[in-house]
Amino acid sequence: AIGMCTAIAARMAGASKVAVSEIEAGKIARIQRLGFDVINPRECDGVQRVRQLTDGHGFNCVFEASGAPAGYELLTKAGSYRAKGVNIGMNFKPSPLITRDIMVTEMRIQAIRIHQQSVFGLTANMFAHLSEQAKQSLYTLISDDYDFEHLKDAFEFCVNDRSYCKVMVKISG
């Protein structure tokens, strides 16, 4: 969901071309309903798809939100000359960053820890000023919602359904 939120924010900020890399069928359908191009590295060569979508140039800014080794590899190959690469994902396995690709294209790489209080405050402020249409785009990221009394069911859904995006637990009171 972080990647999809990033894509929505990029579109709202005026990006002319936004694509999302994803391998889960349920998430791909959600991404397509939001009107984004999809790069599914299980079905195509991710680098070739990027070149196809960008007339051979690559993206000016590439975000890696999955934390997966394959995502970091695509990060260094999907950018245009002097692109910015932004690492949002948390990786727990060694991940390849191809320094040759970074040097040849003069890519700038930045890491952002999205759970910082200052970033959360900026995000909350941005959300408060969104149009209703933009808010509806974000609400489509919620796969299901549960009352607090059914918290166990919510956790089971998250564990058993890999296509989920976000689950909302409603706390009454």
Image (tube, grey):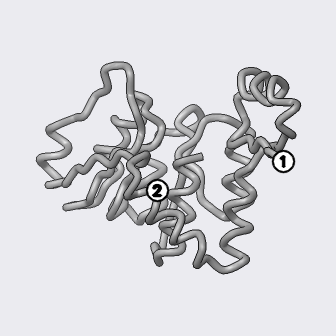
- Residue 132 placement, left or right of 115: right
Q: Position of residue 82 (x, y in %)?
A: 19, 61
The answer to whether residue 47 is seen in the rendering is no
Label 1 amino acid?
Ser
Instruction: Please tell me which residue is depicted at 52% across the width and 36% down the height of the picture.
Output: 41
Report the side of 150 relative to 58 (left or right): right
Residue 129: percent from left, percent from top: 58, 78
Q: Nearer the viewer, residue 80 or 97?
A: 97
Camera-side residue: 67 or 22? 67
Q: What's the residue at 80%, 29% (across, down)?
A: 151
Say if residue 49 shows up in the picture. yes
Label drawn at residue 172: 1
Rounded to the nearest angstrom, the CA distance separating label 2 from label 1 is 23 Å
Relative height, residue 103 to residue 160 (above, below): below
The residue at which mark 2 appears reads as: 120
Residue 24 figure quarter: top right
What kind of residue is marked 2? Phe
Q: Secondary structure at mark 2?
A: helix
